[in-house]
Amino acid sequence: MTRFIVIIVVVCFSCRKENKFVSRNMNTVEIHTILEDSLLSIRAIELLNDKSLTFAANGGVFGLYNPKTGLWQTSVQKQDSLRPHFRAVAHTGEDFFMLSIASPALLFKTGDEGKMELVYKEIADGVFYDAMTFWNDLEGLAIGDSVDGCLSVIITRDGGNTWMKTPCRDLPEGLAHEGAFAASNTNIAIVGNQTWVATTAGRVYHSSDKGKTWVVYDTPIVKEKDTEGIYAIDFYDDLNGFAIGGDYTNPDAHAANKIRTMDGGKTWHLVAKDQIPGYRSCVQYVPGSAGKELVAVGFQGIDYSSDSGTSWKHLSDASFYTIRFLNDSTAYAGGRGRISMLTFRE
């Protein structure tokens, strides 16, 4: 795969500009698998502006899908003798990025000669990065589990060429063992300069200035066990957000695993208590839905809401870890051994 990088650099951020929303009620989802590999666990996918799709996974594997040709280009990233396990990817208008879990943390970006190049490395006990995204073409961040008493936050201000770790003095004090679940690359939500980060402790960190200053808010989501907390967060605009989680070891439990905010994350309220879905690893707003439609995915299936998460409908038992919408009725989803295209229908 010699020209993979040339293709993936043409990217852009999606926007929320939309026409008046017409209420819908999706009843079915059609699933068309476009990549199958039983050895892969795919939790990080990214849509590019030309409607192509990228991913990075375990074993150092990453790839690009061209929907016009239906063809994949894949490669394997190695670092010395290591084949990193990737669960976070991101992009700017120039480059593609992928970040590995555990220590050493390895962050790669598009290189000038058709190969990925290492731009950040961190070795320490407890290092484990979970998610990554960008505010704009110059500024981005990645977050990870707590080290030395605070959440791990690394930030770039030069398009991803260099990354600096935010010192604990500039972050809220972390709780014992607080981190994030590297389940779907959706621990971070961004709208404009606003940023929200969801943690295993059921807390939401908020920055209004692209990561320069932070505050933290508690939520009522279930969080008593190490396997409980917020697994995914999404914001439709700067006020309306939704988060989901639960306990992957008890996936049918649904008493307190879905929360919603309407004031920019300052306060959160439980919704759909004692209702489906149970544990899910990813939740996303449907584009152009005025914040009404949500889809959640997990290893126990796909669920849909048409009322901002107040109630849900189970659409499929198909197992996926993460989802990204292409438009208001089509999405890509990654899971164990596959990436599929999902088409939602009324």
Image (spheres, grey):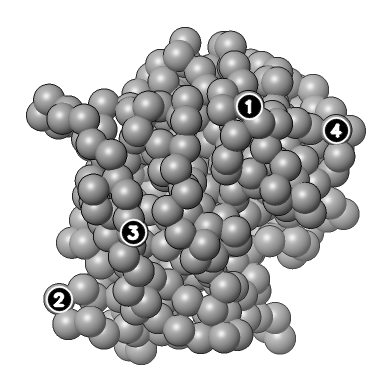
Residue 139 placement, left or right of 98: left
Residue hosting label 2: 68
Task: Give the label on residue 29, or none.
Answer: 3
Residue hosting label 1: 273
Most extreme residue toward the bottom is 1
Badge 2 density bin: few <14, some 14–19, many ≥20, Cα 10 Å: few
Determine contact: label 4, label 2, CB under 8 Å.
Answer: no
Amino acid at circle 3: Val
Q: Can residue 337 be seen in this view?
A: yes
Q: Nearer the viewer, mark 4 or mark 3?
A: 3
Q: In front here: 83 or 26?
A: 26
Q: Which of marks 4 and 1 is in front?
A: 1
Residue 37 vertical placement versus 66 (above, below): below
Q: Earlier in the sequence, mark 1 or mark 3?
A: 3
Question: Which residue: 51% across, 18% down?
Answer: 261
Badge 4 density bin: few <14, some 14–19, many ≥20, Cα 10 Å: few
Q: What element carries label 1?
A: loop
Residue 115 vertical placement versus 130 (above, below): below
Amino acid at circle 4: Glu
Q: In which image quadrant can residue 342 be found?
A: bottom left
Residue hosting label 4: 224
Question: Which residue: 64% across, 71% down?
Answer: 85
Q: What element carries label 3?
A: strand
Determine contact: label 2, label 3, CB under 8 Å.
Answer: no
Q: Which of marks 4 and 1 is nearer the N terminus?
A: 4
Residue 54 placement, left or right of 93: right
Q: In which image quadrant can residue 5 be found?
A: bottom left
Disc 2 to disc 3, C-alpha distance: 22 Å
